[in-house]
């Protein structure tokens, strides 16, 4: 082992405490390979552009990054999640502290976010046991949500078993929702507590995240764009008389299933049905011509909004129209208000 000594002009040795940083001996903690995990992670969130996020998912980076602390290996050292924010799907790296006391990113990524077209959702979910991470996937109108467990072993994320399935309005509390913080705000890291203290979205007995109280005619969700192919696939329909390719629909995807009363052709009085979607507008191409309404909703695609409207403008479809079974809102000539959340 070699040592470094600095000498003053008068020939006396420089006090090691005054050595330049690059020449100082590592602390005993670092020599033992334990490292200072908080300092390591502080460097990561201060330099997020130094890391590579490799994925085939559709990613449209916004230029910002988010992070969260989680417990995924069952030890006393938390893992760091670093997300490349995106207007579509967002890739997430998992950082662990290696035997050298340094933070190391995973070689593969998990996915978080919402696809603006098609309604597919993904989320990184913590485990209540502190062992592993879950990749949540929810495809459009299906009421089932898939949770794929991944083990975290150094820089490798490995699938464990087959995906687990849960109904969107009865998700077990073992799936823990993660709270993300901008990398420009180190306060969550400095607190040192894992950012997974609540059940995943849709879990049993979960209150709305923002405690929002909605009145009659008020609905909250994310505006999504569906192609006719996606609407048919979600409904499991094979309809030769369906609108042609190029047709699309704008829908409000609620935060969870809702029981809604609305008029329905052929019925006496309001009919109550359960749905996750409200159709806001459409642009259809058919053999009888092109038809469209509510195209102004395209400007809200990918945004979470609150829509306040007159309940009398809502209706349930009594014919085969797309997306199948979704609540209808006729915005043309209607008095309504949109608030971005």
Image (cartoon, helix red, strand yellow):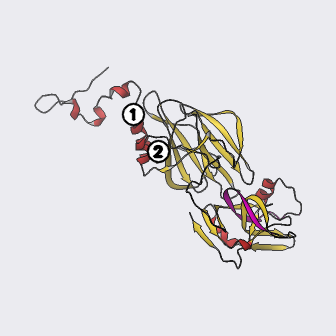
Residue plotted at (70% across, 38% down): 163
Image x and y of residue 31, in percent: 37, 25
Q: Which mark is residue 90?
A: none
Count residues near mark 2 (Cα–Cα under 10 Å), then give few for <14, some for 14-19, many for 20+. Answer: few
Residue plotted at (80% across, 60% down): 325
| 244 to the left or right of 144 | right
Q: Which residue is mark 1?
A: 36
| 53 to the left or right of 261 | left
**Which residues are drawn in magenta?**
240-263
Q: Quadrant of residue 149?
A: top right
Quarter of the figure with the C terminus: bottom right
Task: Tell me: residue 278, above or below residue 92.
Answer: below
Count residues near mark 1 (Cα–Cα under 10 Å), then give few for <14, some for 14-19, many for 20+. Answer: some
Task: Tell me: residue 69, above or below residue 113.
Answer: above
Image x and y of residue 138, in percent: 69, 49
Task: Tell me: residue 274, above or below residue 96.
Answer: below
Principal SS element in the magenta part?
strand
């Amino acid at each position: 082992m070699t040592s470094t000594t600095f000498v003053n002009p008068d020939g006396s040795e420089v006090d090691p405490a005054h050595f330049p940083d690059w020449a100082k001996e590592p602390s005993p903690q670092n020599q033992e390979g334990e490292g200072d995990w908080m300092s390591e992670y502080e460097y990561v969130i201060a330099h997020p552009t130094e890391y590579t996020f490799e994925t085939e998912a559709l990613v449209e980076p916004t230029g910002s990054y988010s992070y969260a602390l989680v417990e995924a290996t069952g030890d006393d050292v938390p893992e760091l999640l670093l997300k490349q924010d995106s207007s579509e799907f967002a890739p997430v790296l998992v950082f662990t502290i290696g035997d050298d006391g340094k933070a190391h990113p995973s070689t593969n990524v998990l996915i978080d976010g919402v696809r603006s077209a098609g309604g597919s959702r993904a989320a990184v979910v913590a485990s209540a046991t502190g062992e592993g991470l879950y990749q949540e996937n929810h495809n459009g109108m299906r009421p089932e949500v898939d949770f794929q467990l991944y083990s975290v072993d150094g820089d490798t994320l490995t699938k464990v078993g087959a995906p687990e399935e849960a109904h969107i309005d009865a998700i077990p509390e073992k799936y823990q929702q993660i709270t993300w913080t901008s990398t420009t705000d180190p306060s969550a890291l400095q607190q040192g507590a894992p950012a997974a203290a609540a059940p995943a979205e849709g879990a049993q007995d979960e209150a709305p995240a923002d405690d929002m109280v909605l009145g009659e005619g008020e609905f909250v969700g994310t505006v999504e764009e569906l192609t006719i192919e996606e609407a048919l696939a979600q409904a499991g329909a094979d309809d030769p008389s369906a609108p042609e390719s190029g047709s699309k629909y704008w829908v409000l995807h609620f935060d969870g299933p809702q029981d809604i009363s609305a008029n329905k052709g052929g019925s006496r009085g309001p009919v109550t049905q359960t749905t996750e979607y409200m159709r806001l507008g459409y642009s259809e191409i058919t053999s009888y011509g092109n038809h469209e309404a509510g195209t102004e909703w395209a400007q809200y695609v990918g945004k979470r909004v609150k829509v306040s409207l007159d309940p009398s403008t809502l209706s349930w479809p009594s014919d085969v129209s797309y997306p199948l079974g979704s609540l209808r809102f006729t915005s043309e000539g209607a008095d309504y208000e949109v608030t971005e959340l």
